Amino acid sequence: MITVNVNNTVHSFSTPTNLQDLLTQLNISDKGIAVAINNQIISKKDWNQRQLSNDENILIIRATQGG
């Protein structure tokens, strides 16, 4: 079992997963977001290859418009 912290909420998965799978399982659209794992930005092109490890901290930031 893998447990990760996503935006201060703990999520557990029974099978190994990558970052793209995590976003899909959490119903998070990949449009207009940035993702950091353990304070390191992960390029969108690497989301399918980036395997998640137990106890990692994931921060998802959504771009917003404003003025």
Image (tube, rainbow, N blue to C red):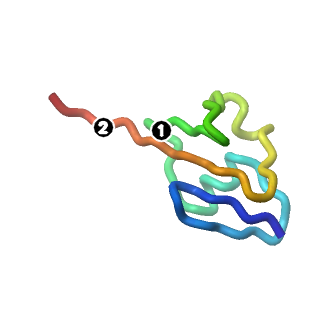
Classify the position of the N terminus by image quarter.
bottom right
- Residue at horizontal 19 percent and vertical 33 percent from the top: 66
Q: Is residue 10 left or right of residue 46?
A: left
Q: Amino acid at mark 1?
A: Ile
Q: Which residue is mark 2?
A: 64
Closest to the observer: 57 or 67? 57
Up-down relation of residue 40 to residue 38 (above or below): above
Q: Is residue 18 left or right of residue 66?
A: right
Label located before the other in sequence (1 or 2): 1
- Disc 1 is placed on an element classified as strand
* Badge 1 vs badge 2, beta-carbon distance below 8 Å: no
Closest to the observer: 66 or 9? 9
Residue 67 % position (x, y): 15, 28
- Residue at horizontal 60 percent and vertical 53 percent from the top: 23
Q: Residues within 10 Å of mark 2 (few under 14, many from 20)?
A: few
Residue 27 % position (x, y): 53, 60
- Disc 2 is placed on an element classified as loop
Q: Which residue is mark 1?
A: 33
- Residue at horizontal 43 percent and vertical 36 percent from the top: 32
Q: Is residue 25 left or right of residue 64?
A: right
Q: Residue furthest left?
A: 67
Q: Amino acid at mark 2?
A: Thr
Residue 65 % position (x, y): 25, 33
